[in-house]
């Protein structure tokens, strides 16, 4: 019976993960927090933070509580999430990991080009 439940619940878990990832990119979270929520510049790392901490922080933002001037930007983003999306996002970010073999930010570019983008 346990195997039966696990087999049929796994696709739902994976679907929730895909929905959360889509929500992360749809809301442009990656533009400040990075592709894997690893943090960029003044935007903090969210990747791998405990789910309960992330959930509490998102709920604080939804209530208009910001800890810094940059945090005030997040209030409107957090308020756009409904209750289920808030829970999904906290779960997604807490389990998110940057792939070991990904060198996305470490690539070297040839700067001897023709001056065009």
Image (tube, rainbow, N blue to C red):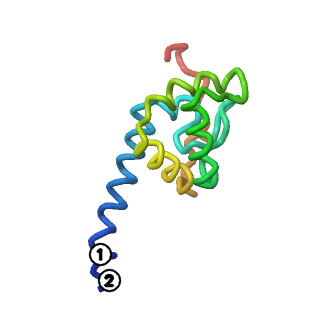
When asked about the image quadrant of residue 112, the answer is top right
- Left or right of 8 in this view: 38: right
Residue that carries the numbered disc 2 in the rendered image: 3
User: Exactly how many numbered labels are in the figure?
Assistant: 2
Q: Report the residue at 54% width, 49% height from top.
A: 93
Q: Report the residue at 32% width, 83% height from top.
A: 3
- Helix, strand or loop for disc 1: helix
Label 1 crowd (10 A; few <14 / some 14-19 / many >=20): few
Label placed on residue 38: none
Q: Report the residue at 63% width, 22% height from top.
A: 72
Q: Is residue 113 above or below residue 94?
A: above
When asked about the image quadrant of residue 43, the answer is top right
Label placed on residue 7: 1
Q: Position of residue 6 (x, y in %)?
A: 34, 76
Q: Report the residue at 36% width, 50% height from top.
A: 18
- Left or right of 93 in this view: 26: left
| Furthest-bottom residue in this view | 1
Give yes or no for contact between labels 1 and 2 (Cβ–Cβ under 8 Å).
yes
- Helix, strand or loop for disc 2: helix
When asked about the image quadrant of residue 32, the answer is top right
- Picture quarter with the N terminus: bottom left
- Left or right of 87 in this view: 34: right
């Amino acid at each position: 019976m346990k195997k039966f439940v696990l087999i049929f619940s796994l696709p739902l878990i994976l679907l929730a993960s895909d929905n959360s990832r889509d929500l992360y990119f749809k809301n442009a979270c990656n533009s400040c927090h990075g592709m894997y929520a690893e943090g960029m510049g003044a935007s903090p790392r969210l990747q791998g933070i405990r789910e309960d901490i992330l959930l509490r922080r998102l709920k604080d933002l939804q209530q208009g509580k910001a800890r810094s001037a940059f945090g005030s930007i997040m209030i409107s983003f957090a308020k756009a999430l409904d209750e289920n999306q808030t829970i999904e996002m906290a779960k997604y970010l807490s389990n998110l990991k940057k792939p070991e073999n990904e060198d996305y930010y470490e690539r070297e570019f040839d700067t001897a080009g023709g001056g065009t983008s």
